[in-house]
Image (spheres, helix red, strand yellow):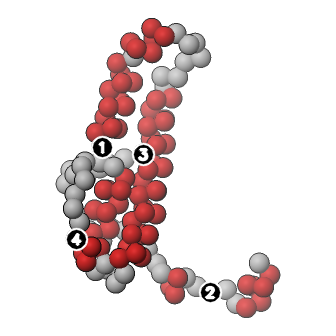
Amino acid sequence: MKTPNNVSASIVTRNMSELANDTGNVYESIAIISKRANQLAVKLKEELNGKLAEFATTVDNLEEVFENREQIEISKHYERLPKPTNLAIEEFLEGKVMYRTEEEVPQLPEAARRAE
């Protein structure tokens, strides 16, 4: 996963009115950001698990666990990445997050709604 360089890995104070610019509602913006952060977290976790799966062993050898420097470096790299929440906020503020409101979702005909 490609992470932008301009995203801070630490906590940043945010202007709440900036978050509400696109949606007109802070809570709606936070809900959108939250869903995007969850998507990013799942993607990062799958990527990390895929890389660490190469090191999976069936033997419980304690010495081998402490000696695997490459695995430790991969883990440290992912720890240094910006958190998914920070990435999601930056994407939202830059207008890179696509979303739609409930009014924009096409409604099913009345008969189809009753069938569900």
Q: Are marks 3 and 4 in contact (CB under 8 Å)?
A: no
Q: Position of residue 116 (x, y in %)?
A: 77, 78
Q: Earlier in the sequence, mark 4 or mark 2?
A: 4
- Image-based side of 96 in relation to 6, left or right: right
Q: Residue at x 67, y 86 (%)?
A: 108
The residue to which callout 4 is attached is: 15
Q: Which residue lies under the disc numbered 3?
A: 44
Contact (CB < 8 A) between labels 4 and 1? no
Give the Cα separation between the discs numbered 4 and 1.
23 Å
User: Would residue 98 be visible to someone looking at this image?
Assistant: no
- Helix, strand or loop at mark 2: loop
Q: Earlier in the sequence, mark 4 or mark 1?
A: 4
Please state which of the two labelled residues, at mark 2 or mark 1, is closer to the viewer: 1
Amino acid carrying label 4: it is Asn
> Could you tell me the amino acid type at mark 1?
Leu
Label 2 to label 1, Cα distance in Å?
40 Å
> How crowded is the residue under tag 2: few (<14 C-alpha within 10 Å), some, or many (20+)?
few
Disc on res. 113: none
The residue wearing badge 1 is 81
